[in-house]
Amino acid sequence: MLTVRAARLDDLGVIVKLERYCFPPEVAFGRQRWHYLLSHAKGRTLLLHDDREQLMGYLCLLEHKGWDRLVIQTLAIHWRVRRQGWARRLLEQVIAHGREQGWGAVRLEVADGNEEALPLYRRLGFRAQQRLPDYYGRGQHAHRLVLALREPAASVRARKAV
């Protein structure tokens, strides 16, 4: 059975290890970036552990009040537990939290070639907002996806006028 809990600074080593396992060096966040995300950044990181307390996945989320958005910095699931719905569960937890807290949207970037993640994001309601050429390096394009958590004010006003 897998469990989810909030990350702590003392999780830094195992997070960096899984990051390096899941992502190529040119894309993976380094130890300094993770230290910042866990100790100073406004947001939270959710960890997915197995019954032996081994890290099987994580989702790092930042709050951006100026954009009224939650920004998913990174999401990784160990190959041993992929295709079991854990990424979806972590994302659904973030979406529910965002709605409860009154955030306007959730944003993330995803590589065009990420054939596993793209269908999942679309099923959850994320929509492409912007194409990002060479985002992950030369010839490695991505898209910025956004999931609106509430209707834009103009839509709400128009409905009330009817």
Image: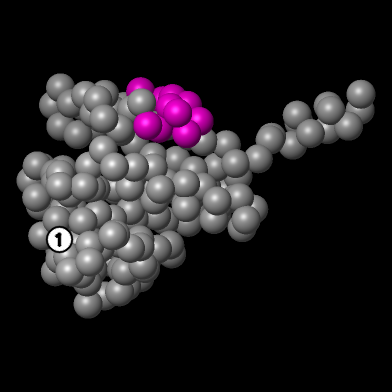
Query: Residue furthest toward the front?
Result: 1
Q: Do we see residue 32 in this rendering?
A: no
Q: Position of residue 15 (x, y in %)?
A: 19, 62
Q: Residue type at mark 1?
A: Val
Of 25 and 100, nearer the camera is 100
* Identity of the residue drawn at 65% across and 40% down: 150
Of 97 and 145, nearer the camera is 97
Query: Residue furthest toward the bottom?
Result: 10
Q: Position of residue 107 (x, y in %)?
A: 45, 40
* Quadrant where the N terminus is found in the figure: bottom left
Residue 125 belongs to the span the image colors magenta: yes
Of 7 and 29, nearer the camera is 7
**Position of 56 relative to 89 (above/below):** below
* Quadrant where the C terminus is found in the figure: top right
Report the residue marked by disc 1. 16
- Mark 1, secondary structure of its residue: helix
* Identity of the residue drawn at 42% across and 56% down: 62
Q: Do we see residue 150 in this rendering?
A: yes
**Position of 42 relative to 75 (above/below):** below
The part of the chain drawn in magenta is 120-131
* Identity of the residue drawn at 15% across and 22% down: 139
Count the numbered circles shown.
Answer: 1
Q: Position of residue 46 (x, y in %)?
A: 35, 61
- Classify 10 Å Cα crowding around label 1: few (below 14), some (14-19), many (20 and above): some
Q: Is residue 91 left or right of residue 138?
A: right
Residue 148 belongs to the span the image colors magenta: no
